[in-house]
Image (spheres, rainbow, N blue to C red):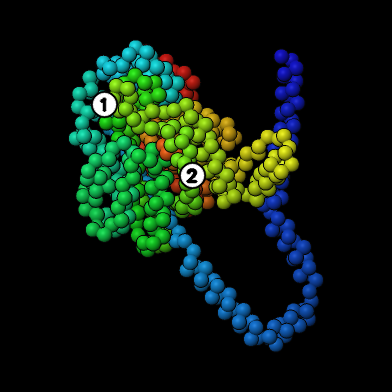
Amino acid sequence: MGNENKQNQEKEPNSTKLKYVKLGFHYLISNALYLFLVPLTIALSHFSVEDFIHLFHHIKLNLVVVILCTMLTFILTTFYLMSRPKQVYLLDFACYKPDSSLICKRETFIKKTRLVGDFTEESLAFQKKILERSGYGEKTYVSKALLDLPVRNLCLEEARKEAEMVIFGAVDQLLAKTGVNSKDIGILVLNCSLLNPTPSLSAMVVNRYKLRGNISCYNLSGMGCSAGLVSIDLAKRLLQIRPNSYALVVSMESLTLAGYDGNVRSMLIPNCLFRMGSAAILLTNRSSDRHCSKYQLVHALRTHKGADDRGYNCVFQKEDINNRLGVALSKDLLPVAGEGLTNNFTTLGPLVLPLSEQILFLVNFIGRKVFKMKIKQYVPDFKLAFEHFCIHAGGRAVLDELEKSLGLSEWHMEPSRMTLYRFGNTSSSSLWYELAYTEAKGRIKKGDRAWQIAFGSGFKCNSVVWRALRTINSANEKHNPWIDEIDSFPIHVPEVEPIDC
């Protein structure tokens, strides 16, 4: 024991030294341009007035060349400005906070599950164990139909009512916050994985808000928890070809018909994890709206592992041997998620990381792959690229692993962990509850960069990067779902919290 303590004490100073060496290297590379300008400025300072006069006469004698160069520069600049992608801005967003009557305490969940009557004692004990280790609090929400004890009214009509409540609740708030007329919305993208009625949920939105007849309308289903960022990417691409437009993105999940009443363990886990929630986001490409927008969309990156059978099958909706429908999570889920995240991060890294981190990664890669050196793979420090992290609150184990692999602090993980505790896994909308938490805490400053990371069935891993266009004053966020209780967070969440029932 004494030897271990001694080794740890020796490692700490070395790790501290390495940290400062790395920090110094980062500043050296980041300020290389300024270091180059210093000798250039010194050299120019030795020029006399006669030297500059001589240079002016030389240019005057070559006036035609100067004019041609100026014209060429003007043409190339104009071509660049016209051909570059249109900037996309996030005007505002809203997260739905259900009524307190829809709160589902963990004890209530277990009692409701027991009264269903179809679960064995082993299945009930398994679900209780999952919930005790979930990191959930006592104020998550479920649909009204699921709170009936015993459950009786699980039908399409109830599922529609649930969808209307969460979708309209979020969109109504968003339109009130932005003051945008619904007739001005030219693009609508709605995602919901497990509820796909006819007419579609997106058509339901068009009907409710009387959106215009030529609207570009899309309804995404079956794409899992990562579908929210897929919707953002789709809206961004549509805004490139629809000038002066607004794009409404709605992310939600339906619980009413999504429950599983069998006894296969891999299909019982979603029962315990998913909760009610939704988010509505308004994007625009109007340059006149930049001054009142919250964020600018910097990058949207998607990685798909569906070509790999493990990735395709790791989250799969199917019937069990008794023909009971549910979503099965395979043991390959975490390894596949790790591979997808690695691929996504590797692609995103060169776009966002400072040059110093890219050099360190390249040197490490060459050492391992070319010279076959037995060294640990270098994980870039993404904290140098982003101030805020919104990692999909899919579950405690996933958040723990990402915190470790990315070297994030408790402060960085706080929005994701508190969202998991307060609202549970709300599927594709969870990222927006996390960003809302960050805003409610008053952490968003002008120029800050926020990284949203989502993953879901297929298997897909998606990233979106935002840059704050202004400092967000939490006092002005009246419709923020956290604002009336934000002072009570963060709180400590024990690894295991027993349920007495």
Check the picture and name the quadrant holding the N terminus: top right
Label 2: how many Cα within 10 Å (few below 14, some 14–19, many 20+): some
Quadrant in the picture for the C terminus: top left
**In the image, what residue type sits under mark 2?**
Thr
Q: Position of residue 8 (x, y in %)?
A: 71, 23
Q: Residues within 10 Å of mark 1 (few under 14, many from 20)?
A: many
The answer to which of 321 and 115 lies nearer the viewer is 321
N-term mark: 1 or 2: 1
Residue with the most extreme bottom position: 61
Q: Which residue is drawn at 55% across and 47% down?
A: 348
Tell me residue 124's x, y (percent). 35, 15
The number of numbered badges drawn on the structure is 2
Q: Is residue 171 above or below residue 44?
A: above
What SS does tag 2 mark?
strand
- Residue that appears at 19% across and 27% down: 153
User: Where on the picture, by quarter, is residue 374?
Assistant: top right
Query: Which of the two marks, 1 or 2, is nearer to us in this view?
Result: 2
> Which type of secondary structure does the marked residue at label 1 adopt?
helix
Q: Name the residue under label 1.
A: 146
Q: Mark 2 points at which residue?
A: 303
